[in-house]
Amino acid sequence: MLTGIGYVLLSGICNGLFTAPMKIIRRWKWENIWLVFVLTSCLVMPFTAVTLTVPNYAVLFHRAPSAAVRFAMIFGFAWGFGAILFGRAVDRLGVSVANTLVIGLSSALGSLVPLFLNGKIMQFDRQRGLLYLGVLVFIAGVWICGSAGRKRDAVRASSQSSAAGYVFAIGAGVMSAVFNIGYALALPIAAAGEQMGYSRFVGTNCIWLLMLACGAVPNIIYCAALAGRHHSGILFVSHAPARAWLLSILMGILWGGSIFLYGAATPLLGDIGPSIGWPLSLAVALVTANLMGVWLREWRGAGRDGVRLMRIGIGTLFAAIVLCAVSAKAGS
């Protein structure tokens, strides 16, 4: 169990860290960074993991219910647009605000997805009461953090941040729920893997491969279109690009690693996985992203009111995470 908790902590750290290189790379444009990130995290990493652990993965996909395979591909493709929105949100708002808004929104919606899927959204008991309260607190925390970001932007008169950045963050948070729905509907693929003698973790890797590969498609097309418009393709090979390549690849490794680490942690946590593992991972990601925001000086010159409001918002999101954790425990 201690190993599982260690994996959860590392997963949260990787999730909170992965966008930081975007604010360090200077010579490349957004599309250059994001394209390398997507190729690494959505194609190279999942394909490598599946090839090493499921040599006959084509047979597994053939044996899995066709509906589950279709759901993984369709919802993965839809999630790809959310990934684009998230990348643009980080570019406009910074690591701290963008991650906080998206984590808060995706957590709130992700808590409700299972209830929608099993038709129990209208039922009410102690567990659901705590969950709904947690969702409301999540929404309040997101609103407070968004207000803090707007105060920061007003004080700094930053040309990099705009209303579009907040729209991108909201869209990314909503689309992450689409990813959760697709994953839930694709779980029969993992079950088919278990019937073939593979572990649950290995079976879920096959789900990641389908969803992430399909999600990579709109990202690759969008980045290619921007590269053509901005004539930025030359940056991949000019101006000593080794550092930019390494940092962009690191982004992909950190984000992909966060998924695989959490997937490896879940079987080790047993019954506490839903109640402790996921909220702990979210909390660590939230703290890590905001520490990186401080390190990158995103709040420098933002004014006391904006910083104070952001701290209140983060505290509110922590309270929401605790409430959702308690609700999960109440149902176990």
Image: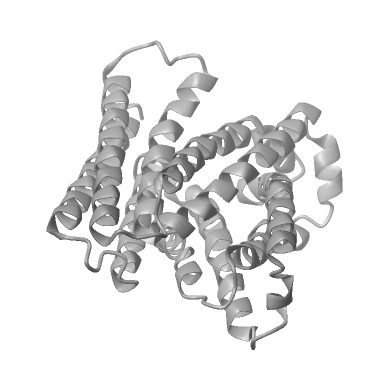
Using the image, determine if residue 242 lies above or below residue 138: below
What colour scheme does the image use?
A: one colour
In the image, 28: left or right of 206?
left
Depth order, front residue of 305/82 = 305
**Can you say which quadrant of the picture contains the C terminus?**
top left
> In the current view of this chain or complex, which residue is farthest to the bottom?
240
Residue drawn 28% across and 68% down?
294
Tell me where residue 225 sits by quadrant. Answer: bottom right
**Can you say which quadrant of the picture contains the N terminus?**
bottom left
Depth order, front residue of 253/204 = 253
Using the image, determine if residue 7 lies above or below residue 28: above
Residue drawn 25% across and 34% down?
140
- Residue 65 position within the rendered picture, expressed as x and y whole percent measured from the top left: 78, 29
In the image, 62: left or right of 9?
right
- Residue 288 position within the rendered picture, expressed as x and y whole percent measured from the top left: 34, 63
In the image, 245: left or right of 140?
right
Tell me if I can see residue 43 in this picture.
Answer: yes
Residue drawn 65% across and 37% down?
78
Residue drawn 81% across and 43% down?
60
- Residue 170 position within the rendered picture, expressed as x and y whole percent measured from the top left: 44, 39
Tell me if I can see residue 1 in this picture.
Answer: no
- Residue 134 position within the rendered picture, expressed as x and y whole percent measured from the top left: 28, 31
Using the image, determine if residue 18 lies above or below residue 112: below
